[in-house]
Every structure is written in structure tokens, then in C-alpha cells.
Amino acid sequence: MDYIIRLADNTRPATLKLLRRLHSECLPYDKLPNFTEGFWWIAYHGDDAVGFAGMVRSARWIDAGYMNRAGVVPDHRGHGLQKRLIRVRMRYAKRIGWRWLITDTTENPPSANSLIGCGFRAYDPANPWGGRTTTYWRRAL
């Protein structure tokens, strides 16, 4: 399948509405993030929005970004789109001068496998911010 990933203009109300819809469809039980913060991308298949991903500056390190959320609608999973959403954030983070990307997963083997496939490695942060079953990931850029 052919996909195009575009950097979203998260100052536009229509974009924020689309990101909220995608989040609700992909991650119906998760709390909505603040889509006005950081950088967001939307993946399209033709005219249909089928995935999204976000990244913010790390609150802990000055030269790092935190990949805070991503999702792919169920009908488009299994086509490598999650990895493409990771890679687009890696390229952008490097372009704006960040040296590291960090993220976390909680009981989510597909996302963990996508991160591993993109060169991320699990690590134990000095001050964990997630729950007991959270796995922390990082990658130098």
C-alpha cells in the first residue's frame, strides 16, 4: 500500500480535530495528549488519514526528543507504517539538532518490535516515569 506522511500544522482547528479522531480510533482507551504541543505527523492512504505520530522536546534532557504517541487505524496495520512514523520523527529530530530520541511502551509488543527494528534499545532510566510494566527505549541519532 502507498502511504504519504505529512508534518501536520497543529495550529489549525481542523488538524486538531483530525488528530483527536485518529487518536480515538487508534487508541480508544488512552487519554488524549495535548496536540498543540510539539510536532505531529499524519499518515495518508490516498485522501484518507490512517495514522498519526507525535514528538515533543524531552522534559529531562536538552538534546533529546520524546516520541509521545503514535497510532495506525486497524485496517492499515501490518504494512510497516508504524516504522515509517518512527523514522520520520528520527529524521526530523536530527534535523532540528536533537542527539537522542526516547520513548516508552507498556505491554505493547508490536510497538516494541517496531522500535527495535528502527534501532532503539531498551534501557533503565535513573528516574522512571511510567508504571511497573513500562519499557523505556532510546536511540542516538
Image: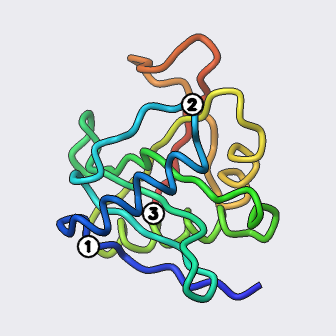
Disc 1 designates what residue? 9
Amino acid bearing label 1 = Asp
For the residues carrying marks 2 and 1, which lies nearer the camera in this image? Answer: 2
Location of residue 18 by image quarter: bottom left
Label 2, secondary structure: give it: loop
User: What's under tag 2, amino acid-wise?
Assistant: Tyr
Q: How many marks?
A: 3
Crowding near the residue tagged with mark 1, few <14, some 14–19, many ≥20 C-alpha atoms within 10 Å: some
Vertical relation: 66 (above or below) 86: above
Q: CA distance from mark 3 to mark 1?
A: 24 Å
Judge left or right: residue 73 versus residue 52: right
Q: Reading the chain from its start, which is encountered first: label 3 or label 1?
A: 1
Residue 115 vs residue 18, the one in the foreground:
18
Give the crowd class for mark 2: few <14, some 14-19, many >=20 residues within 10 Å: few
Residue at position x 54%, y 24% from top?
Answer: 124
Residue at the limit of the structure toward the top, as seen here: 132
Q: Residue drawn at (50%, 62%), measured in percent from left and top?
A: 52
In percent of width and height, residue 70 lies at: 53, 52
Q: Which tag is nearer the camera, tag 3 or tag 2?
A: 2
Residue 68 percent location from the top left of the image: 42, 45
Label 3 sits on a secondary structure element that is loop
Mark number displayed over residue 29: 2
- Identify which residue, 9 or 55, lies in the foreground: 9
The quadrant of the rendering that contains the C terminus is: bottom left
Nearer mark to the viewer, of 3 and 1 = 1
Crowding around mark 3 (Cα neighbors within 10 Å: few <14, some 14 to 19, many 20+) is: some
Q: Residue at x 29, y 51 (%)?
A: 35
**In the rendered structure, which disc, 2 or 1, sits on the residue that comes first in sequence?**
1
Residue holding disc 3 = 141
Amino acid identity at mark 3: Leu
Residue at the image point whose x is 41% and y is 20% from the top: 129
42 on left or right of 106: left
